[in-house]
Image (cartoon, grey):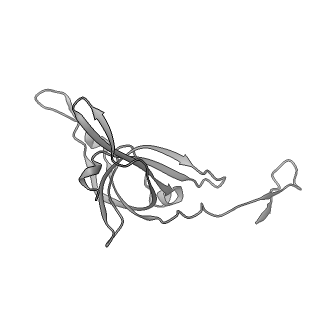
Amino acid sequence: MLCLMPELAFPTTILLCTGGDMPNLIHPIPVFIQQIERERTTRMDDNLREPVGAVERNPIILNLRGQIKWGSQDRPNPTTTGTEELSDGYILFKGSDLRKLHVTLNRGDRVVQIGVTPNIQLVDLYFTKFEPIAHKSNGNHLTKAFFEDRQPSTHRV
């Protein structure tokens, strides 16, 4: 679609305007997320007077649609206490979907389930970082939420 931009220095300039929302995700599936509650997470131990790192999570599970890309799966990581297995990847979310639902994803939020019946996969994934990508002039973008699976062998077939 072509559109005129009269606010430009040269009003006769014609630009190609894409308009509309971001392109749809490829094969989006339901992703169920349990968010961390940072304000309730740090508590003080009454006896030792030290912070206790028990993580509190919101009991409400969010149902978002995302496009999942698994990175390296079942990657062994040798440590001094033995082999530790890790998996990683990312999930793409549409920024417009997150804004509509008033959701802000945070580092430490946990993905508990991917898909719905009959293709449910119970997982234990934790978001590690976020990158906004595919910016458009109307403010829409995609959010690339990187995750890490701390125990991939416990639920993979």
Residue 105 seen in this snapshot: no
Report the label total.
0
Image point (27%, 47%), residue name: 151
Looking at the rendering, which quadrant does residue 86 occupy? Answer: top left
Q: In x, y percent, where is residue 141?
A: 57, 53
In the displayed orientation, state which residue is furthest to the bottom.
118
Q: Nearer the viewer, residue 56 or 80?
A: 80
Q: Residue 129 in the image: state x and y as whole percent.
A: 44, 42
Q: Give the x, y percent position of residue 123.
A: 30, 56
| Residue at (56, 64) in percent of width and height | 24
The image shows residue 146, relative to residue 120, as above or below, that is above
Image quadrant for the N terminus?
bottom right
Furthest residue in direction left, as rendered: 47
5 over 72 or under it: above or below: below
Q: Which residue: 38% across, 43% down?
A: 107
Question: Which residue is at the front of the view, 133 or 79?
Answer: 79
| Residue 74 image position (x, y, % from top left) | 33, 47
Residue 116 visible in image: yes
Q: Quadrant of the C terminus?
A: bottom left
Taking the image as shown, residue 81 lies to the left or right of residue 18, namely left
Name the one closer to the observer, 23 or 60.
23
Q: Report whether 99 appears left or right of 85.
A: right
Is 132 positioned to the left or the right of 56 in the image? right
Q: Residue at x 74, y 60 (%)?
A: 17
**Quadrant location of residue 114?**
bottom left
